[in-house]
Image (cartoon, rainbow, N blue to C red):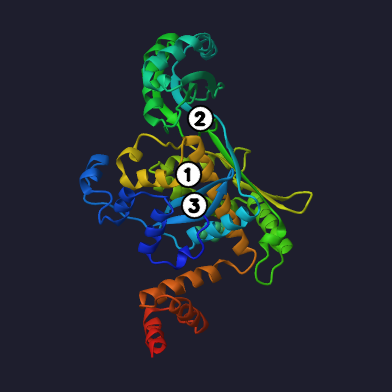
Amino acid sequence: MKSSRIPGFYKMAVEERRELLQNMEWISDDETEYLFSKEPLQVETADKMIENVIGTFPLPLGLGLNFLINEKEYVVPMAIEEPSVVASASHIAKIVRDAGGFSTEATERDMIGQIQVVGCSDYRAAKQVLLDAKETLIKEANAAYPSIVARGGGAKDIDVRILNEEADSLYNQMLVFHLYINTCDAMGANIINTMAESLAPTIEELTGGKVYLRILSNYADRCLAKARCVIPPKLLATGDFTGEEVRDGVIHAYEFAASDPYRAVTHNKGIMNGIDPVVIATGNDWRAVEAGAHAYAVRHGQYSSMTTWKADENGNLVGELELPMSIGTVGGAIRVHPISQMAHKLLDIHSAQELSQVIVAVGLAQNLGALKALVTDGIQKGHMALHSRSVAIAAGATGEMIDIIAERLRDEKEIRVGKAKELVEEYKK
Ligand code: MEV
């Protein structure tokens, strides 16, 4: 049966993991072939994706396990170079799973196209003319990209603002026109930019001004996804720390990030540690997601925590994460990158709304993983445990030997391959 709970996955050899995924029907024979292939992204394909190509740049692809989101099982492909991230997300996903799983939701996927108009003789009059022409402008925008309308999306609404009405220079007074476009399952950059560009001549004609920028906004605050988890403290107990101590530590850590931008940046970096790898593995534009997420974190005026952590009336730890999620499940690199196609299959995702909900659930898990470590043993202990295992494996340790050698390396405070090789030899004797 398809389950994201796979005990001992981390101890298996890579090939065993692939075989298991196939046996569990997470991936098919074809997809396994991509994984085994020496060059999953062929240089010929890469050469069609960007310019001046000289090769490809592989990243480790791991699986976030144990994710139960809205009662559905997910194994989550994560492309990332940083150790501990995948282990930490999976560890927290297990805890949340035991607490009933993540609950998530997403808004409609209304993206924003911006048009900048300058040089109007009367900005208020120009604004009114555009507002009065709303239906015509929406129709004209949709005519520029009929296929998205056929899919049930398209331009739906507009908004007009005057910036710097009390202008102190000719340059800073402007009118900003927003076109709200439902891009369905596409991230939608091409749809939005095409529509924005197509409206420019009409907007110049209506306002008597001059249009400069015609571009999407990555601050997709009408395309939000939200994840929530409620964890009884007993599931948080670790080592010598009670669940209540961990819960309180996490809430104190959150309050720190909520009040101090210096901490909030690092706290949020930890959240993006979970989000970016999924965005990358699914062939999406992680710079767009990063930019939107950080802007959303400053929406109340001060840069702050993306997540919230509180205790409810029963003493449970309640975490929430809401972010703009300008990602897609069709188009762009997804169509051409074989690994990203496989990532979508592995996730068994049926819409961009669904993918965006998985992404915020991983971000929330990643944040709790970091905070739980930080308020208990500190993050180095976990890092060192994982690092010592990799060193043991690099020195030739296999099976049960790995954990024994790794522990010796940590005990003897000498985590290096040379030392590990000596221990492997000793063990074999
Ligand atoms: C490291 O990549 C991420 C953390 O610094 C996040 C945090 O401090 O919350 C551990």
Does label 1 or label 3 sit earlier along the sequence? Answer: 3
Label number found at residue 345:
none
Report the front residue among 277 and 7.
7
Q: Which quadrant of the picture is home to ligand 1?
A: bottom right
Using the image, determine if residue 322 lies above or below residue 82. above
Question: Which amino acid type is marked by label 3?
Answer: Met
Q: Residue at x 48, y 40 (%)?
A: 355
Question: Which amino acid type is marked by label 1?
Answer: Glu
> Which callout, 3 or 2, points to the residue nearer the camera?
3
Q: CA distance from mark 3 to mark 2?
A: 33 Å
Q: CA distance from mark 1 to mark 3?
A: 35 Å
Report the front residue among 405 and 268.
405
Does label 1 or label 2 sit earlier along the sequence? Answer: 2
Which residue is tagged 1? 290
Label number found at residue 109:
2
Q: Residue at x 71, y 61 (%)?
A: 234
